[in-house]
Image (cartoon, grey):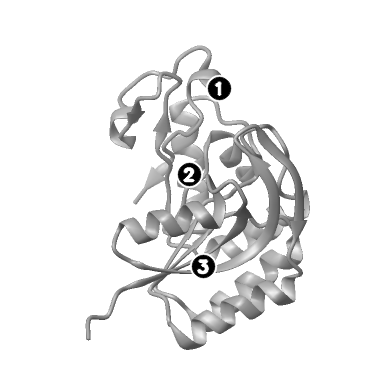
Amino acid sequence: MKKYPCVLSIAGSDCSGGAGIQADIKTISAAGVYAASAVTAVTVQNTCGVSDVFPVPPQYVAAQIEAVMSDIHPDAVKIGMVSDADTVRAIAECLSRFKPRYIVFDPVMVSSSGRKLMSDEAVTVICQELFPLCTLITPNIDEASMLLHRKITTVDEMKAAAREHVPRRAAALCAVVHRADGADLHPLQALQQPLPQKQHQQYSNLPLWNH
């Protein structure tokens, strides 16, 4: 019998299907990989924005992760929306115990409509307890600024911040570039281009560092 690799997505639920657990399952399945999930929050949202968020209690987030880890043994874990510090601690404890081979963290800190999705305490705990476990972290530029506790506005600042931060934390810190005209740039292409004056309007994600 063929054994498919498995990815566990730990994220919020998006009832409109465009983000969160639903989007992860579609993406993972399209790659021919088996998708498992642990829901961290139930959101009320659509293409217009997020109107409400109900966090799943940390013990139930941990219970979902333990159920999948102890039976299906996923090869990789992808973490998305985690809104509070206790949930971050619960996830970090589970991952430390089960030690999946790959852990990718895409910090969902602010929704596209501008709603803040993560507490300040959660950001601190993520840096202290979750980052050291991760293989890859993929923040956009605003999320990277929040996580690194400094404003990042140029490519040189991105490189400097990542060189300082990555050796202490994850194996890699990198993000793809999205342009306002809809054309995505490869990270290496982005590093070769000067940052535009209205950078925050034209670029939502910028490459940081990958070693």
Q: Nearer the viewer, mark 3 or mark 1?
A: 1
> Where, by quadrant of the figure, is residue 57 drawn?
bottom right
Mark 3 and mark 1: span between their CA atoms?
Answer: 30 Å
Residue occupied by mark 2: 162
Q: Residue at x 55, y 78 (%)?
A: 96
Image location (x, y in percent) of residue 196:
45, 15
Answer left or right for 44 relative to 4.
right
Assign a secondary structure to mark 3: helix
Give the crowd class for mark 1: few <14, some 14-19, many >=20 residues within 10 Å: some
Q: Taking 156 as reference, is 108 above or below it?
A: below
The label on residue 133 is 3
Residue at image coords 52%, 50%: 165
Residue on which disc 1 sits: 200
Nearer the viewer's eye, disc 2 or disc 3?
3
Q: Secondary structure at mark 2?
A: helix
Foreground: disc 2 or disc 1: 1
Residue 103 placed where, x, y %?
Answer: 46, 65
**Residue at mark 2 to residue at mark 1: CA–CA distance:** 19 Å
- The kind of residue on which mark 2 rests is Ala
Question: Which dot marks residue 105?
Answer: none
Give the Cα separation between the discs numbered 2 and 3: 16 Å
| Front residue of 89 and 51 | 51
The residue sitting at the left extreme is 1
Q: Amino acid at mark 1?
A: His
At horizontal 30% and vertical 34% (from top left) the residue drawn is: 186
Label 2: few (<14), some or many (≥20) within 10 Å?
many
In depth, the one of 208 and 115 nearer the eye is 115
| Percent position of residue 32, x then y | 29, 63
